[in-house]
Amino acid sequence: MKAQHTPGPWHVTGDYVRNENDGLVGEALNLWANVKTPTDERKANARLIAAAPDLLAALLDFVAASEAIASGDTSMNLPWGTARAAIAKARDTQ
């Protein structure tokens, strides 16, 4: 049986990643007891984690469109906008 991830969209609150119902999905932290990860790095990690569902969806769309185009379907367009939006979410440049 394949486990399913918590449905998106996910968003960042400080170092925490939450779902659309404000439920906790995860926290960006460093588990090494003697290492303190800088706050900016934790926030960047949280943004990347929060963008994971969007990145997966964009990649799945991109692969499906690429396969359709490769098989001769000229009506398909590559989903550049979806991919760029997911990347922007991960980089916090929305």
Image: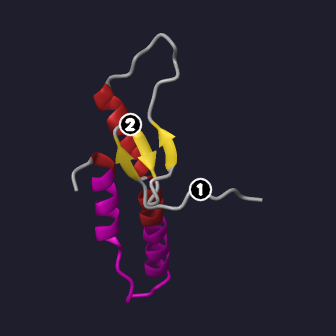
For marks 2 and 1, the one nearer the N-term is 1
Neighbour class for label 2 at 10 Å: few (<14), some, many (≥20)?
some
Q: Residue, x 39% and y 45% (percent of image)?
A: 48
Q: Quadrant of residue 4?
A: bottom right
**Disc ID at residue 15:** 2
Q: Quadrant of residue 36?
A: top left
Q: Residue, x 34% and y 63% (percent of image)?
A: 83
SS label for mark 2: loop
Nearest the camera: 17 or 71? 17
Q: Which residue of the protein is positioned furthest toward the right in this rendering? A: 1
Say how the picture is coloured: secondary structure
On the image, the x and y values in percent for residue 80 come to: 30, 69
SS label for mark 1: loop
User: Which span is picked out in magenta?
Assistant: 60-89
Q: Which residue of the protein is positioned furthest toward the front in this rendering? A: 22
**Disc ID at residue 5:** 1
Task: Look at label 2 and name its amino acid.
Answer: Asp
- In this rendering, the answer to whether 58 lies above or below 73 is above
Q: Residue, x 35% and y 44% (percent of image)?
A: 13
Q: Is residue 21 visible?
A: yes
